Structures are given as C-alpha cells and as structure tokens.
Image: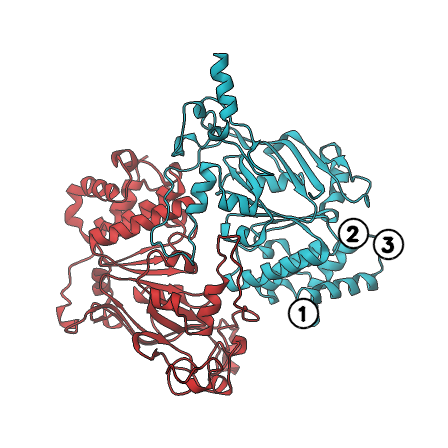
C-alpha cells in the first residue's frame, strides 16, 4: 500500500449562479497516493475539472469551496507539508501552486505567454519559487529538462507559436517538472492533440512517472487513456464519486451501473461488435439534481431506495469502492428489520 | 418579439443536360487540388511573383463515393479532410481537378443552378451550438432550408418540421418547436442539426466530425440515429472524423489522408484488419484501447505531421516512416490496389506497385 500524498475529505464546491446554487462537487472524499497515476473520468459537467481546480484552491467567483479539508502530505521539504491547505492564506497558497502541485491544461497555447521564449518561461518559474538560483543555473536546468522531454535544445529559444502542439504540451510538463512538484494535475492535457502525438506524449509521461516518481491526477473523458495510463480510476457522476478502485478492478469487475454503462459505451477499435451500448437519458441539471442516487432516473437496475436515499461510497472488495445501493445488502436488511 | 426571417428562394433549374450518363457514384473526385495562397504583404507579393507559397491542403486526390454508402475520411488535423468535405459541396472552389455530384461537374454550375442542387446535399458540423442561431427557434431553424428550397411548402411548414423532429427522436415534436437552442441539451441540439439537414430530403450528407463534441453516452445514441436515418431516407454520408474507433461503427469504406493526399482507401474491414500503409498502421495503433490488459506493441512514428506549405518530396510520410527506402524520397507513390484486392488501394511504393520487393517485410512467396 502506497502512502497518501493528498487526502481530500468531504470536499464540496458550489457555484452561486443566477438560477440557483449549483453544487458541482458534492461531498467527495478521495486519497491520492504517492507515485500513482489516478485517472478521474466522467462526462462533461460531472465536476471532474472543478475537483481538479479545487485541489489547488483555484475555484473563482461565483464558485467557492463551501466545505471540506485538503490535507497535503508532502515529503516535509516545505513548511506546509502535512497541513490542511484550506487553512492557508491566499499568499501562502500561491507558494504551494507550482512548487508542490502543478497543473497542465488542455490548451497549452493559452497557458504559455506568446511573447516569452520557452527558456524564459522555465527560468522564470524556477526563479520565482527558488529565488536563490542563479540565472545560469536556472538556464542549465531548463535546458536539461527540455532535452529530457525530447525537444532539441536550440528550440528552447523559440516562442510558443513556433512549436508544434505536442511540443508545447511537453513544455508544460517541463514547467511542472522544473520545480519537482509532488503532484501534477493534468486536466484533459492530451485532448487537443492528434492521436499519434497524444500517444507519443503519453509514452513520455509514463516514462517520466517511473523516473521521477511522479504522482499524477489524470482528468479526462477519454476512457482509453485511463485504461492505458492509470493505476487507479475514479468515476464521477453529477458531482459525486460513483466508483473508485484499481484500474483492473474497475474495468473488469465494474460495480456501479453508471460506470458499467460508461465503459460499455466506449468504442473499442479492437472489438468486433458493430453496435455500441447506448445509455439512455442525459446527465442531470445540477441546480436541481434528482434526489437519492443521482443516476437513478437513468439506471437500468433502479430500486425503490435509490430515489430516496443517497448511497454512501463503500468498499466492496479490496480497495474497490462504489456508491450504489445494489451492493448494500446488509444496510437494506437492517432497514427492513428496523421497520 | 417574433422575428420574421427573410428567405431568398431558389428557383427551379433544369440541369439534365449537364448530367453525364450512367453515374453510379454520387460523388466523384478526380485529381482534385486545393491550394490556399499564403497571405503575404504587398512587397513580398511583388518581389516573389512566380514562386508564391501555397498551403497545399488537398494535393491531388481521387476517389468516388458510391450511392448509399458511408464513406469515412480520416486523418490528423491539417491532413485536409475538412477541405475535401467542403469541396464535395462546392463550399470551396477547387484549384485543379473536378468534383462531380451525381454526374454533374460542380464547377460548371452557375450560382442559381448550384443553389438548386444544394437541396440534395446538406451538412452537419461538429458544434451544434455554433451551427444554430441562438435567436431562432428550433422550428424556424429547421424550416429555414425548406422555405429556401421548397417555398410552396409554406402552408405545411409546421407539419413538415414536426415530422422530421419525430424522425430524429425528439418527441413529442410540438414541445420542441418553439424552444431556443440554449433551452435543450447538447445531444438534442445535434439532433436538431440533423433534422435541419434532413428536411430538404437530401441524398448526400456531409458529416464533419458530427459527434466529436458529444459525451461518450450521447455519442452512441447519435451514431445509432445516423445509421437509422441513412436507411429511412436512403442517404449517403461523407463522414469526416479523426476518431478511428468511432469510424468503425458507421463507415462502410474509409480513406486515410496524410498531408493532403490519400494514403490508403478500402473497405473498413480490410483497412482495419490488414492496414498496408505504415501511416495507417501507426494511426490505428495509436488509438488508446479501453482495456487495461492491452498494451501497444507497434512503435510510433517519430515527430509530427509536417507543414503542408513545403511538403517533403516523394512520399510525404517518408521522413517519419519506419520502413522508408531511397525510392520513397524521390518518387511520389500512386494509389494502387494491393495484390488480389482491387478494392483496397494504398499509396506506398513498398506495398503496391513496382517496388514491393524493396519492402523489408516483403515475403516473395506470398506475392
């Protein structure tokens, strides 16, 4: 069992919209273990990106983290290791971002400064967080990283627009690695890349993980990438965790009907079938979500209790959790006995 | 406030004399090129006269789309797949070569004739929110092409719209008629776009990444809908996609594009099971497989798709090709059938044509 790097407890994020309160993340508890790649999957609007941003406390108005604890257990290199990030001031939080937790977004062109050379991005990042590093040393570190990521070192003096999409995304990784971040949050980091470039990028990422002992939270809607990359998978639906477990368990012994439908609906290039599984309905409006289990209106195995009570996330096998009443035999029988 | 949308009606035109006889193919591309001149300053264009640079988006492409099939067009961004789609409907003019629709050379048509022909071809784009006017009700949006092409149907407008809404599975149709696009879900919006494409009863539908924006669960439903409508309305699809895994569920034949040229073309089964071009192989191998027990063994090509401004000489794929030979750098490979399969064409010196013995994987006894 790996040691826990980031412990999320009862995280709730609300967006206060004109039409009412939208609870994008609802009471999510999740442990990210050191050295793992944790895949976070779900459809658009399920709250996976909001969760990723909340880990850095980057939720902006009109949103807020209305409840929860974010325990960050770094290696003790930094003073805030072992504390609840919710207790930090905004200024202190800025120190954490980049230094301990980095984020890679979908579109590198919006994350990189178009009038700054690649080398300046890297040295600036290094020197902002480590002011004692000399220009020369920062430059040398930048060079080393870029070469390590398979970009020729003369390209370091290029501007972002001169690089291809895949190279830009590698620069983003270099930025994250330049400070030896404990945790990298990759939010749809490969979605804008073409399939071959994406595969190349994922190969690099996989090698880096081993080499630098990286911990990655891989947020994506692409189930194939998760299957190929992740050690563990968390499936989100309508702001809540539906299933969590080792990648093999979740894919081969799927518990939650939503996770099951989602996995079956993914086109698989190797399979022979010519029909895709069709999941009826669409995800709920989170301003007025359905009561009980939020999947119950679409669930093929819905029961009476599903619309009445929220199913808790319960361990149903070794390190394999699900939030579904189907697997709560004991609870149900207790209730029958009580009534 | 009710907005009255102006429509410019199309007048009936007789085009029978323009039609070549015996056209089995609905769409024919013959050596089509589409070059976009590179935007230059005034001085540059004066001094560089005669050697202007062009983006060779489509660079000599020939293929036919048979009536009633789903013809897939796949490739990475910048391979020219969307440009081909637009050329098929003459939304863009060709630089060279001819595009025929139902035996009619599109470039010979005058404006009014083209408008008349357009009722037989419709488009579905990727982003339904961008394709629908936010100020037009769904009913108005769907009726719009009908009013242009069949103004005599004005009296039956509502009835015709509700019919087609029912066909795309939006029931009861009357509840959707007066809604606006922002009031419905993304999946429903794409169905509206499909309904609008169907109302003129077209023969050809250009579907340019129609489901790329949809979520996994919606995707399957949309694919299913498109397949069902194809049978109900006798449609032919030109299906453009970058997602080979999805293409598998709908396409009958597929063409793989690389840098404005066809790399491979054939029945879907043949291309997927027995890919010949090294690029097709790489493309298929790179698709992430949703099975944690599977690991890719095929190596990936180096680098990325080069610029279409100065494409590499010979075979455009040769700088990245794992099996490239000297001939590949010099001579442009033509699309030729592989041995024994006249339907399965590949543009690779080592896989079809005269230089197959140079292929490092070549087995003479098989050939």
The residue labelled by disc 1 is A155
- Say which chain is cyan: A
- Identify the residue at horizontal 67%, vertical 71% (top origin): A152
Q: Is residue A213 above or below residue B37?
A: above
Same-chain check, marks 3 and 2: yes
Q: Nearer the viewer, residue A130 or B42?
A: A130
| Mark 2: secondary structure | helix
Q: Label 1 marks which chain's residue?
A: A
| Label 3 – label 2 distance at C-alpha | 9 Å
x then y, percent, for residue A126: 77, 55
Sort mark 2 into few (<14), some (14-19) or many (20+) by Cα contacts within 10 Å. Answer: few
The residue labelled by disc 2 is A128
The residue labelled by disc 3 is A132
Q: Nearer the viewer, residue B131 or B280?
A: B280
- Give left or right: position of A141 versus A117: right
- From this viewpoint, is residue B215 visible? no
Quadrant of residue A245 in the image? Answer: top right
Q: Label 3 marks which chain's residue?
A: A
Quadrant of residue A139 in the image? Answer: bottom right
Q: Residue furthest top?
A: A339
Sort mark 3 into few (<14), some (14-19) or many (20+) by Cα contacts within 10 Å. Answer: few
- Give left or right: position of B291 versus B226: right
Q: Nearer the viewer, residue B178 or B302?
A: B302
């Amino acid at each position: 069992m790996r040691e826990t790097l980031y412990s999320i407890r009862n995280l709730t994020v609300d967006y206060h919209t004109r039409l009412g309160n939208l609870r994008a993340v609802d009471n999510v508890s999740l442990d990210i273990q050191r050295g793992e790649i944790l895949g976070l999957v779900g459809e658009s609007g399920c709250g996976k990106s909001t969760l990723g941003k909340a880990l850095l406390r980057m939720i902006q108005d009109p949103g807020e983290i209305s409840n929860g604890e974010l325990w960050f257990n770094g290696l003790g290199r930094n003073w805030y290791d072992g504390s609840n990030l919710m207790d930090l001031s905004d200024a202190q939080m800025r120190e954490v971002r980049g230094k301990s937790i980095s984020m890679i977004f979908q579109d590198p062109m919006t994350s990189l400064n178009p009038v700054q050379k690649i080398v300046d991005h890297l040295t600036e990042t290094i020197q902002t967080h480590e002011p004692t590093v000399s220009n020369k040393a920062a430059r040398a570190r930048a060079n080393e990283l870029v070469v390590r990521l398979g970009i020729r070192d003369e390209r370091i003096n290029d501007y972002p627009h001169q690089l291809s999409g895949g190279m830009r995304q590698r620069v983003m990784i270099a930025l994250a690695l330049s400070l030896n971040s404990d945790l990298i949050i990759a939010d749809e980091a490969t979605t804008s890349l073409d399939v071959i470039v994406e595969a190349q990028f994922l190969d690099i990422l996989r090698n880096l993980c081993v080499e630098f002992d990286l911990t990655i939270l891989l947020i994506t809607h692409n189930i194939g990438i998760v299957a190929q990359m992740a050690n563990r998978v968390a499936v989100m639906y309508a702001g809540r965790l539906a299933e969590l477990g080792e990648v093999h368990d979740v894919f081969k012994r799927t518990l939650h009907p939503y996770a099951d439908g989602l996995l079956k609906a993914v086109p698989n290039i190797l399979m022979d079938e010519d029909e895709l599984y069709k999941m009826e309905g669409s995800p709920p409006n989170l301003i007025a979500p359905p009561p009980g289990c939020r999947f119950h209106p679409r669930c093929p195995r819905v029961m009476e209790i599903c619309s009445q009570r929220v199913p808790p996330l319960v361990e149903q096998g070794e390190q394999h959790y699900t939030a579904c009443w189907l697997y709560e035999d004991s609870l149900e029988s207790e209730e029958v006995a009580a009534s | 406030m009710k907005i009255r949308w102006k429509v410019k009606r199309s007048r009936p035109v007789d085009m029978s004399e323009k039609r070549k006889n015996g056209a089995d193919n609905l769409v024919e591309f013959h050596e089509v090129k589409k070059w976009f001149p590179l935007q230059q300053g005034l001085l540059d264009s004066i001094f560089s006269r005669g050697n202007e640079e062009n983006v060779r988006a489509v660079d000599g492409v020939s293929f036919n789309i048979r009536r009633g099939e789903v013809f897939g067009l796949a490739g990475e961004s910048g391979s020219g797949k969307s440009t081909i789609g637009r050329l098929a409907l003459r939304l863009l003019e060709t630089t060279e070569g001819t595009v025929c629709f139902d035996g009619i050379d599109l470039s010979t048509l005058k404006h009014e004739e083209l408008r008349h022909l357009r009722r037989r071809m419709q488009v579905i784009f990727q982003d339904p929110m961008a394709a629908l006017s936010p100020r037009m009700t769904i009913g108005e949006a769907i009726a719009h092409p009908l009013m242009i092409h069949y103004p005599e149907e004005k009296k039956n407008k509502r009835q015709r719209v509700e019919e087609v809404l029912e066909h795309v599975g939006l029931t009861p149709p009357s509840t959707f008629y007066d809604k606006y696009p922002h009031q419905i879900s993304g999946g429903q919006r794409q169905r509206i776009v499909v309904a609008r494409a169907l109302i003129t009863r077209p023969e050809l539908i250009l579907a340019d990444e129609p489901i790329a924006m949809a979520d996994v669960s919606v995707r399957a439903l949309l694919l299913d809908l498109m397949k069902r409508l194809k049978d109900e309305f006798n449609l032919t699809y030109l299906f453009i996609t970058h997602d080979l895994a999805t293409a598998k569920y709908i396409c009958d034949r597929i063409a793989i594009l690389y840098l404005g040229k066809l790399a491979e073309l054939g029945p879907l089964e043949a291309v997927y099971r027995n890919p010949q071009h090294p690029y097709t192989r790489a493309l298929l191998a790179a698709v992430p497989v949703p099975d944690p027990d599977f690991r890719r063994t095929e190596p990936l090509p180096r680098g990325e798709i080069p610029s279409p401004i100065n494409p590499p000489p010979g075979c455009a794929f040769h700088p990245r090709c794992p099996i490239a030979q000297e001939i590949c750098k010099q001579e442009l490979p033509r699309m030729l059938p592989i041995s024994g399969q006249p339907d399965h064409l590949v543009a690779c010196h080592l896989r079809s044509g005269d230089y197959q013995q140079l292929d490092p994987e070549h087995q003479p006894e098989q050939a």
